[in-house]
Image: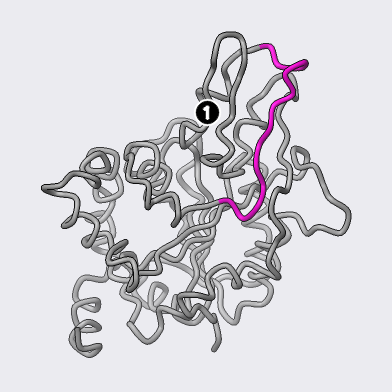
Amino acid sequence: MNHAINNLIKKVLAARSSTVDLYTPIFGLVPKVAPYIESRLFGPLLRRMIMIEPDEARFTQGYILNLNEDITDNAQGVVLPIEMIKQVIKDAPYRMAMDRCLCRVAHDCKDYPHDIGCIFIGEGARVAVENGIARELTLEESLAYVDRAAQLGLIGHALWVEFESYVWGIKDEDVHRCLDICFCCPCCCTAFNLLRNSNYKKLTTRFRSIGWKASCDEAACSTCLQCVKKCPVSAISCRGDRVVIDEEACLGCGICAVSCPNDAIRLSLKNPLKGGIKDYFAQGGLTLDV
């Protein structure tokens, strides 16, 4: 589609302070439509609507970054995920935040506060401030925002979602200059709901761990099943008297470890890290340049 026409569509559709509430139900619909993403009849249309197909033309993806340092087995000299988030924020030319999470508002979350939303970094995000649905942040405010998310037990999630450029009104030429740092709860996150409620395997190639995986110390485990209940993507199960973690499905979010009363679960780095968060999105052309 011609960029000028596409940008006009985005301008018309973009959420504003007076209309943002109209978009909230979209985030609540995800669990209901997710099972149909793989269907022969509705699947192709749904996958195009949320812009994850065709594969060769779409770069929507997300990487999970645990914010809790205490549950991570640190390899010497390895930068922790929370520090990776803070570094990309420090390097960004522009920062803004939404002071409510549309996912938690849509699901009326009872376990986590609604008033901590996403941080958007990069000049491409400036339009959301201009439309009155977000506010610009100083560097100090941004870092404090991350620390608060960590204290609340939320999960860091670096996201580049093409569909959202229509919600926020980000121009085609600015999509590569905007990255979403989301602070997700395991119950309401749209990406987690897609993964949890759909068996469409290609989704797992778009939402991944940056390298950490959970493992369980059987000797310390009491089989209380808190980890099974909390895992946002159902990667943990109980087989007999053993807790089993599907390492391939595990996103390394750390919710299982935080929830474990016996400190039986830890996160370990299984794959080498890239230089920084931007490097994980390089295939799609993300630069965050001014």
Amino acid type, residue under disc 1 in the picture: Lys
Q: Going by the image, does 39 lie left or right of 110?
A: left
**Relative to residue 198, is residue 110 depicted above or below?**
above
**Relative to residue 216, is residue 114 depicted above or below?**
below
Q: Residue furthest right?
A: 76
- For the point 65% across and 70% down, which residue is it? 88
**Residue 66 rendering spot, x and y as whole percentages:** 64, 47
The residue at which mark 1 appears reads as 230
Per the image, label 1 sits on a secondary structure element best described as helix
**Relative to residue 232, is residue 50 depicted above or below?**
below
Q: Residue furthest top?
A: 240
Q: Callout 1: 10 Å neighbours few (<14), some, many (20+)?
A: many
- For the point 27% across and 59% down, which residue is it? 50
**Residue 52 rendering spot, x and y as whole percentages:** 32, 61
Q: Residue furthest left?
A: 41
Q: How many marks?
A: 1
Queried whether the magenta region covers residue 217, the answer comes back as yes
**Residue 236 rendering spot, x and y as whole percentages:** 54, 27
**Quadrant assignment for the N terminus:** bottom left
Colour scheme shown:
one colour
Q: Foreground residue, 46 or 87?
A: 46
Queried whether the magenta region covers residue 102, the answer comes back as no
Q: Which residues are magenta?
A: 209-222
**Residue 282 rendering spot, x and y as whole percentages:** 54, 75
Q: Going by the image, does 121 lie left or right of 43?
A: right
Q: Foreground residue, 246 or 208?
A: 246
Q: Foreground residue, 91 or 97?
A: 91
**Quadrant assignment for the C terminus:** bottom right
- For the point 64% across and 64% down, which residue is it? 141
Q: Foreground residue, 190 or 225?
A: 225
Asked which quadrant contains residue 18, the reply is: bottom left
